[in-house]
Image (spheres, grey):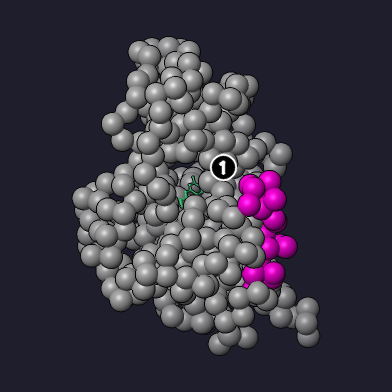
């Protein structure tokens, strides 16, 4: 048993992980310091880099490399360029401007750019030769996956149902992040509707494991402690990918008001909404969600809505106003309450390791 736990899966062995744990990529909620801390503690740390311009991506990757010699991941959103017409922007601002006014901000306006150029980000990622490159929102072409692999990167694609996992395998992905409906943050769905792809982690992981045979599956969504990691491995996953669990950490750069709201969150307080960003994402219900969702025809598609609500959310964060923030969180956020407030990443990973080892031994002893 002890030997089996030393390297509980080929994925954990490949990256020499102390436990089968990926610190999930979270755009806006990770930093080089957080990622390096997760790596140094024995997990695979992941930088959520979707919002970073290529030059900043290079700066952040250099900062991670300076702080750890262990493997790490960098994650991007696979997105076409956003070219919204004026009417779409105007309609969205008509709903957003009253909220801006409440925070003392002038009316919003059309922007030169709504998201960094994905092709330029990808070119930079290839040039940086990162150990692991992970993606969500769509599948890469086989040619792009081949470029990353030629640069020495291990490629992870996100799937919310089996057909998406099969598409990523066909493109050449090395592993699949199985994102269950419980997961905090944006849904990765790219085939079919988001409603049809709300498959719980417990149902999704074994179906992907069976469909993908030798391609490693990482379980994401609703996992907050070592019991969940052990359960994910029992379902055939090679590691668990935890996001919400890392939001409350001392190193996490998110607004204090978000951390405080997380500490009070109950199991039925999250919702999947496109009101804030234009793409379905799970977060804690608040006034921002309810007011923007009240006029669904005014919500611009991602990334336009996301960019148009960004300044409002940034200012709200500085002012400590959680009602105007995007409070992305998974359905199991409340399980984080048992942890000491402001826990370091190293302490969280150590606690997860002890819990996972205890839960694995329990499962082993149940089986005799
Ligand atoms: C604040 C936040 C931001 C996220 N941003 C990203 C992202 O940039 N890229 C990505 O692939 N997944 C992102 N996710 C999803 C996570 O990778 C992962 O699927 C999810 O956190 C797992 O569920 P859990 O939050 O219940 O642990 C985000 C999740 C959260 C909570």
Residue 201 colored magenta? yes
Residue 200 colored magenta? yes
Above-or-below relation of 15 to 312:
below
Q: Which residue is mark 1?
A: 281
Q: Residue at x 64, y 69 (%)?
A: 208
> Which residue occupies the foreground of this view, 48 or 361?
48
Above-or-below relation of 262 to 155:
above
Residue 40 x %, y %: 36, 66
Q: Residue at x 25, y 59 (%)?
A: 124
Residue 189 x %, y %: 57, 52
Mark 1 Cβ inside 8 Å of ligand 1? yes
Q: Residue at x 35, y 41 (%)?
A: 115
Say whether residue 256 is visible: no
> Which residue occupies the foreground of this view, 315 or 248?
315
Q: Which residues are magenta?
A: 192-209
At mark 1, the secondary structure is strand
Task: Locate residue 104: give its quadrant.
Answer: top left
Q: As drawn, is 252 to the left or to the right of 235?
A: left
Task: Give the tally of numbered discs.
Answer: 1
């Amino acid at each position: 048993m002890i030997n089996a736990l030393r390297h509980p899966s080929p994925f954990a062995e490949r990256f020499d992980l102390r436990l089968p744990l990926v610190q999930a990529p979270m755009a806006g909620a990770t930093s080089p310091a957080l990622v390096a801390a997760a790596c140094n503690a024995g997990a695979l740390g992941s930088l959520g880099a979707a919002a970073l311009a290529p030059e900043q991506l290079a700066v952040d990757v250099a900062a991670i490399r300076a702080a750890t010699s262990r493997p790490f991941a960098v994650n991007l959103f696979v997105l076409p360029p956003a070219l919204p017409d004026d009417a779409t922007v105007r309609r969205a601002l008509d709903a957003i401007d009253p909220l801006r006014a409440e925070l003392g901000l002038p009316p919003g306006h059309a922007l030169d750019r709504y998201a960094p150029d994905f092709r330029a980000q990808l070119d930079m990622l290839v040039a940086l030769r990162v150990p692991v490159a992970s993606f969500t929102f769509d599948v890469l072409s086989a040619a792009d996956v081949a470029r990353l692999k030629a640069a020495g990167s291990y490629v992870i694609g996100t799937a919310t149902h089996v057909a998406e996992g099969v598409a990523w395998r066909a493109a050449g992905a090395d592993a699949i992040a199985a994102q269950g409906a419980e997961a905090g943050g944006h849904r990765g769905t790219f085939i079919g509707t988001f409603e049809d792809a709300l498959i719980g982690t417990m149902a999704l992981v074994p179906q992907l494991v069976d469909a993908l045979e030798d391609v490693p599956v990482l379980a994401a969504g609703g996992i907050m402690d070592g019991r969940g990691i052990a359960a994910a491995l029992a379902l055939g996953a090679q590691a668990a990918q935890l996001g919400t669990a890392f939001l409350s950490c001392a190193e996490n750069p998110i607004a204090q008001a978000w951390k405080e709201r997380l500490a009070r969150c109950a199991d039925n307080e999250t919702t999947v909404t496109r009101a804030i960003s234009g793409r379905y994402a799970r977060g804690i219900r608040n006034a921002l969600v309810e007011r923007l969702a009240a006029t669904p025809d005014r919500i611009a598609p991602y990334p336009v809505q996301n960019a148009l609500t960004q300044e409002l959310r940034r200012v709200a964060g500085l002012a400590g106003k959680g009602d105007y923030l995007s409070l992305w969180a998974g359905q199991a956020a409340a399980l984080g309450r048992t942890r000491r407030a402001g826990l370091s990443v190293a302490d969280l990973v150590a606690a997860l390791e002890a819990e996972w080892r205890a839960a694995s031994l329990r499962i082993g002893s149940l089986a005799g």
